[in-house]
Amino acid sequence: MNNINLDREASAPYYPGIKFNAETGVCEIEGESYMEEAYKFYLPIINWIKDFTEKENRKLYFNVKLMYFNTSTSKCLLDIFELLKKYTNEGGEIEVTWYYDPDDPDMIDEVKDFEREADLNFNIKELQA
Amino acid sequence: MEEKDTINHISTHLIETKRSLLAYEGPFFIDLLTIFGNYLKIMTENHSLIQKKIFKIYVELSQNVAYYAEEYITINSESKRIGIGELRITEDVDQYLLMTKNLVKTKDANVLSQRCDIINNSALEDLKYLKRELRKSSESNKLGARIGLVQARLISNNHLDFDIIEKNRHYSYFKLKVKFDKNE
């Protein structure tokens, strides 16, 4: 499997940075995410996770360091978490860590909503500046 | 080489008058919205908790205009449409006010009006449930404008203040105002 490496760009801050490593199983999303047609941006990312969970029988670490995401992105994140839940139901091992911005009073609620909706437990950690 | 000016801090000295932070009318291009958003972050940096809330709802409501306004431009041989609308952000001593206005079909305006009434009359816990249901039950490419309205009510902790202004038999303007209290 190929890795995914998309750096954040100052000229298009509505795209997050994405680093998915097939060798280590460490996947990280960071920055902000409010692009147009979020589902088109996230489709290859979702497909990568599908491939990993179907072909690689290894632990997947999913780290979220998003400072802001719009509701369209939140739908794509939920799709990812549902895939991860399916993987655990089939015996796969995952670890989701959500790094939240302590200056954002609503982020913890969002994270708890995702845990409830996807029926997963996250590690919730404060994002260090 | 000439040094490029960048703005990273703006001081505001407001006593009691309302003032305009931003007023725009035209197509809601995402790159333009990003510039406005960065400016908005700077203008609200003295209220860091509110800053995040305003930015979130600014993006949601602006993208509702960009995607769903009935007046729009098309680019790239009409494969992509960008909604046209109006955006105003004002500030007074106690609050920030975010306003968007765009053209909708009159029959859709009635639906929007009903949805805003339901959102305003629902308990916050019920709205959180509705938001989760909308997200879970929608297809990724058909999330719709309603979840953005629910989010605006939840994040601002204020009612949605809306107006339907008839333009002609077929079209009306949908004007939406959301307040953010500085001392929340």
Image (cartoon, grey):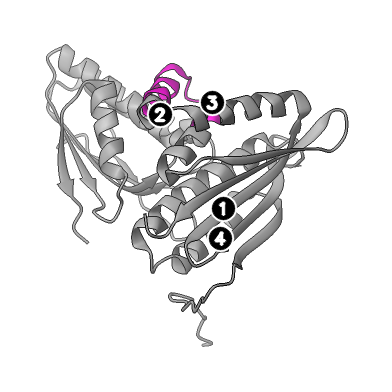
In whole angstroms, how far apart are the C-alphas of marks 4 and 2? 32 Å
- Give the foreground label among 1 and 2: 2
In whole angstroms, how far apart are the C-alphas of marks 2 and 3? 10 Å
Please determine if labels 3 and 1 lie on a single subunit.
yes
In the rendering, which numbered label is found on residue B123?
2
Q: Residue at point 45% right, 27% down?
A: B122
- How packed mark 4 is, by other alpha carbons closer than 10 Å (few <14, some 14-19, many 20 or more), is some
Chain containing mark 1: B
SS state under label 3: helix
Q: Residue at point 67% right, 37% down?
A: B80
- Give the foreground label among 1 and 4: 1
Residue placed under numbered mark 4 in the picture: B36
- Give the foreground label among 3 and 4: 3
Residue placed under numbered mark 1 in the picture: B98
Q: In which quarter of the image is residue A53?
A: top left
Q: Can residue B80 be seen in this view?
A: yes
Type of amino acid under label 2: Ala
**Image-based side of A26 in relation to B91, left or right:** left
Report x, y in % for residue A76: 39, 30
In the rendering, which numbered label is found on residue B118?
3
First of labels 1, 4 by sequence position: 4
B137 is within the stretch colored magenta: yes
Type of amino acid under label 4: Phe
Type of amino acid under label 1: Leu
Please determine if labels 1 and 4 lie on a single subunit.
yes
Chain containing mark 4: B
